Image (cartoon, grey):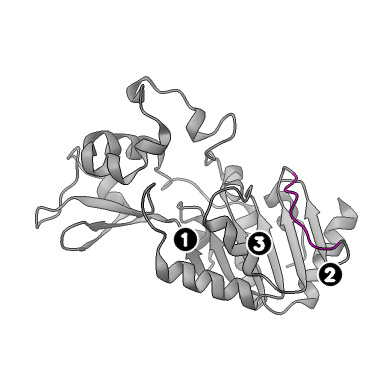
Amino acid sequence: MENALEKLQRFIDESEYIVFFGGAGVSTESGVPDFRSKDGLYNQHDVRFEGYSPEYLLSHSCLVNEPKVFFEFYRQKMDARAVKPNAAHYALARLEAAGKLKAVVTQNIDGLHARAGSKTVYEIHGSTERNYCMRCHRKYPADHIFNSEEAVPHCKCGGVIRCDVTLYEEALPEEAVSKAVKAISKADLLIIGGTSLTVYPAASYVRYFRGKHLVIINKQHLHYSRDAENDLEINEPIGQVLGALNI
């Protein structure tokens, strides 16, 4: 991997507008399970949710039609408040502080990039660290849903308090998506990390990249490249890779 790291370091050193596009693999090194691997959230057997698909449990339909089921699953599986950022999160924050990294575009909802110190983060699937009332849109912190004694948390106005996460059947947040696409289109180096690029429409946003260097850091080969000279793929844990750089 040494030659690959040297090439990645060279790409970073000569780039001025770096954007990082990341997925679940960025947070697995912090202990957050991904969704689709053999040990992922979708393959964890839990008798409490027998008969329900994971996609339904995290859907708008479940929130509206079976809110008690939705919030029980959400509290059990989506609580990342005690999770700590890993080497990848901190390396990206340092890269931003150095003036090189202009944006983090993440499919993750755990808030770990911000906790590590990143400032410009576009959370295109939302975040568990924000909640709001579905009726009056009053904002609530993450602790409110997780610590609420109500099976279904309610606002003072009587509306249901929900997570600011994009559920199945819901559109992605327009502002975050617009800013993410704009950043990717302006980048001279795009680093794609910890994602299989199979979740759409988010995965399609990387196609707006027209810059010089494309780097993929993912445990599995992605079959996504343009040319050997200006592109690079490293199939190793992303924290190990980014943590070894001189940033």
| Left or right position of 81 against 62 | right
State the SS at label 1: loop
Q: Is residue 188 left or right of residue 206?
A: right
Callout in the foreground (2, 3): 2
Callout 1 touching callout 2 (CB < 8 Å): no
Residue found at x 64% / y 64%: 207
For marks 1 and 3, the one nearer the N-term is 3
Query: Label 2: which residue?
Result: 10
Bounds of the magenta span? 221-227
Q: Position of residue 150 (x, y in %)?
A: 17, 40
Residue 78: x and y, percent? 40, 42
Q: Is residue 207 above or below residue 48?
A: below
Of labels 1 and 2, the one closer to you: 1
The image's mark for residue 62 is none
Residue type, numbered disc 2: Arg
Q: Position of residue 4 (x, y in %)?
A: 85, 56
Q: Earlier in the sequence, mark 1 or mark 2?
A: 2
Nearer to me, 168 or 74: 168
Q: Amino acid at mark 3?
A: Ala
Q: CA distance from mark 1 to mark 2?
A: 29 Å
Location of residue 195 in the rendering, given as x and y in whole percent from the top left corner: 62, 50
Mark 1 = which residue? Answer: 124
Which part of the image, by quadrant, shows the C terminus? bottom right
- Report the residue marked by disc 3: 91
